[in-house]
Amino acid sequence: MVTGLNGTPVSDLSPTDGQVLQYNNTDGKWVPQTLSAASGGVSEAYYAVDPSDFVGIRFENQNYNIAMFEDDIRYVTILDRDKGDEIIAPLHLPHNAELLDMDVIFKKMAVLYDMEIALQRKNMYTGSTTNLHYWNTYLSIPMSGMRVHSADLTVLSDEQRTIDNSQYSYRIVVKFDLDNHFSEASDVEVMLYNVRMKYEIQE
């Protein structure tokens, strides 16, 4: 029989299943207590996709076409549309996270050059993909400053906005609609700087 802990007496009360000993300052003893379940609230969190997270998608017999320029490594783009116009980055969000919104930080410098971006989920067992969100810069007016496209992902069904890593993987796919070959950072007309995901998770 345990009669004391560190010189402090244990109460004579008989514990029930699952109770623990807690020190009661009033009695000066360790007393059996039932712990209340943690409230477990919901917290908001963020996930950032850096330009360096992206990889190029190989097109026919061409080399990978993705580009980050040494004199400006803040963004990612492609070099030549004829050599493949898509890049892709994985998303590693927590299981059961619920998507809230997505921000796309970009620049568009000319009317004739554009970018399409899709938030996709891929079924691990069938390989089929679903666009959870799609957007393009076609109606965006060109300007020199960085811009943000914000997408409200709470409009998705509960099933779609809840991350399910047991059967799906998630990714960002970007397609550039360019006509020219770019060899220098100063020539680039459409730049992707970052993608930011906001989600909530049960604590």
Image: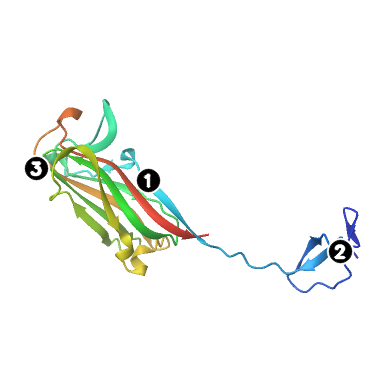
Query: Mark 2: few, some, or many residues within 10 Å (few <14, many ≥20)?
Result: few
In this view, the residue in front, 168 or 25, is: 25
| CA gap, disc 1 and disc 2 | 52 Å
Q: Nearer the viewer, mark 1 or mark 3?
A: 3
First reached walking from the N terminus: tag 1 or tag 3: 1
The part of the image, by quadrant, that contains residue 122 is bottom left
Q: In the rendered view of the protein, which quadrant contains the N terminus? A: bottom right
Mark 3 residue element:
loop
Disc 2 residue type?
Answer: Asp
Q: In the rendered view, would you say 95 is above or below 85? A: below
Please state which amino acid type lies under the numbered disc 1. Answer: Ala
Say if residue 194 shows up in the picture: yes
> For residue 67, which numbered disc appears in the image?
none
Which SS class for mark 2? Answer: loop
Residue 199 sits above or below residue 143 on the image: below
Q: Would you name the residue on which mark 2 appears?
A: 27
What residue is drawn where x is 43% and y is 59%? 97
Q: Quadrant of residue 127?
A: bottom left
Where is residue 180 drawn, in percent x and y? 9, 36
Residue holding disc 1: 48
